Amino acid sequence: MEINAPEVLSEVTAAFERYEAALIGNDVAVLDELFWQSPYTIRYGATENLYGYAAIAAFRAGRQTQDLARTLNNTVITTYGQDYATANTEFRKTTSGRAGRQTQTWLRTPEGWRVVSAHVSFLT
């Protein structure tokens, strides 16, 4: 198994950056697209535990839209073979200054790279 094959790392990085742009721009359609549409998909948020794509999509549809802008630090994306990757980053909200961290597990599906598991938490 090759770790961080350049072409795979480039693909996952592009998907991660697309997700980040959609997150801070509140592009719910793209956020929904980039999560695997499966009952096995999980997202643990700062205040919620979401099991299955339907619960994640419902959360996205009603989430707050204030304080979305943020800066990322110490982002580490690692690919394992051709079809699996993790993305870990620290963030700081621009308006509130709240710091946190985010982990995503990405899987190559027939539709493209999708988040199959995510965790977001605040440090302060």
Image (cartoon, rainbow, N blue to C red):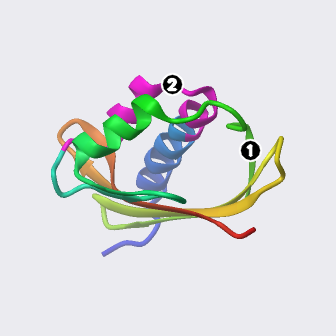
Name the residue located 39 percent from the left edge and 24 percent from the top edge. 29
Is residue 102 rendered to the left or right of residue 116? right
The secondary structure that dominates the magenta segment is helix
Circle 1: element type: strand
Give residue 67's quadrant in the image.
Answer: top right
Circle 2: element type: loop
Q: Position of residue 2 (x, y in %)?
A: 37, 72
Amino acid found under the numbered disc labelled 1: Arg
Is residue 2 rendered to the left or right of residue 27? left
- Image quadrant in which the N terminus is located: bottom left
According to the image, label 1 marks what residue? Answer: 70
Name the residue located 28 percent from the left edge and 58 percent from the top edge. 83
The question of residue 88 being in magenta is answered with: no
Q: Which mark is residue 15?
A: none
- Are the residues flagged by discs 2 and 1 in contact, CB closer than 8 Å? no
Q: Position of residue 11 (x, y in %)?
A: 44, 45
Is residue 76 rendered to the left or right of residue 4? right
The magenta segment is 20-37
